[in-house]
Amino acid sequence: MNGIEGKRRLSRRGLLGGLILGAGLGLGVAPVRASGHAEALLLTCMDFRLVDEVESYMEARGLKDRYDHMVLAGASLGGLNDRFPTWGDVFWAHLDLAIELHEVHRVIVLDHRDCGAYKMILGEASVKDADAELKTHVKQLYAFRSAVLTRHPHMEVEIGLMALDGTVTQIV
């Protein structure tokens, strides 16, 4: 099968799926919806050093098993950068899905100290010392919060910076 035949087949499948969905809606069949409600969508970095700390933080906040979790290298930077713009597309699609399926009304974004993605994407100078690192993260977190609120003005957005010991500084 060549590429054109494959595209036709996918196109037919898409058409058939659309017809089935349309017929189902016409018969009063409700669209598929996940059961349950999530309090928030959590966006964190992929750093393996903080997996347990992130889970402990969310549990301490009373959110155990009550949030969707999305992971992008750099967290807020992963969702909003020029070097890997498709990562942002993935974030927005997931946020829209979380709103639709789980009625999410809050986004919690946790960046972390000593982030390799920040060094790689923005350069070593952006995180050369603790003060520069904090300023860089705060600037990025503010930009990310603004982008979320521009697309979803009704959304609550919490931003924070996690240290490697798991403590979180809330950014206001």
Image: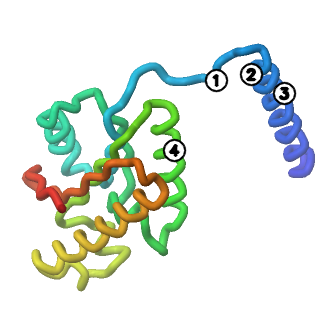
Q: What residue is pinned by disc 1?
A: 31
At label 3, the amino acid type is Leu
At label 4, the amino acid type is Asp
Q: What residue is pinned by disc 3?
A: 19
Q: The residue tagged with tag 3: helix, strand or loop?
A: helix
User: Dot 4: within a 10 Å radius of its alpha carbon, few (fewer than 14), some, or many (20 or more) residues?
Assistant: some
Residue 149: percent from the left, percent from the top? 40, 58
Q: CA distance from mark 4 to mark 2?
A: 21 Å
Q: CA distance from mark 1 to mark 4?
A: 16 Å
Dividing the picture into quarters, in which one does residue 14 lie?
Answer: top right
Query: Which residue is nearer to you in this view: 144 or 8?
Result: 144
Numbered circle sitting on residue 25: 2
Q: CA distance from mark 2 to mark 3?
A: 10 Å
Query: Which residue is nearer to you in this view: 82 or 27?
Result: 27
Lower position in the chain sequence, tag 2 or tag 3 = 3
Q: Residue at x 29, y 65 (%)?
A: 141
Numbered circle sitting on residue 96: 4
Q: The residue tagged with tag 2: helix, strand or loop?
A: helix
Q: CA distance from mark 1 to mark 3?
A: 14 Å
Residue 89: percent from the left, percent from the top? 54, 57
Circle 1/circle 4 CB separation < 8 Å? no
Circle 2/circle 1 CB separation < 8 Å? yes
Residue 78: percent from the left, percent from the top? 40, 62
Circle 3/circle 4 CB separation < 8 Å? no
Q: The residue tagged with tag 4: helix, strand or loop?
A: helix
